[in-house]
Image: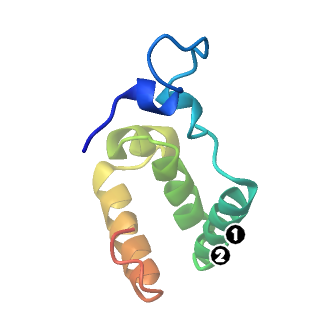
Amino acid sequence: MVRGESAILGGPGGDDIRGIEELVSPEPTPEFAAMVAEQYERLLGRLEKPSLRTIAQLKLEGYSNEEVAERLDCSLRTVERRLWLIRTIWSEDGFDDA
């Protein structure tokens, strides 16, 4: 059976105006945040060349390949080749979807 928010809030007519969004925090737990930070540092550490680390960081920040090329003053093809190399290095660690 599927129930609405009123089942969680104590039934209809309750004074509690909090909704389902109050049950789950939008913030990660400290443990999860630490795990992500550790993994981030470990993966970047696998990239020996500073240019590869820079490209990986920019991509993780959400920049498109074209924006990365523009920021680094290089060709789009160069960025694509380096991203392929990054994926190859990271796939050795079992991160095939990186």
Question: As displayed, is residue 9 above or below residue 39?
Answer: above
Judging from the image, what secondary structure is the residue with disc 2 in?
Answer: helix
**Helix, strand or loop at disc 1?**
helix
Percent across and percent down for residue 27 are 64, 41
Q: Nearer the viewer, residue 57 or 75?
A: 57
Query: Which residue is under mark 2?
Result: 42
Label 2 neighbourhood size at 10 Å, few (<14), some (14-19), many (20+)? few
Residue at position x 61%, y 39% in the image:
25
Residue pointed to by mark 1: 38
In this view, the residue farthest toward the left is: 1
Tag 2 near tag 1, CB within 8 Å: yes
Q: Within the image, what quadrant is residue 82 found in?
A: bottom left
Left or right: 62 in relation to 36: left
Q: Nearer the viewer, residue 29 or 12?
A: 12
Percent x, y for residue 9? 53, 26
Question: Of circles 2 and 1, which is in front?
Answer: 1
Classify 96 as above or below 71. Answer: below
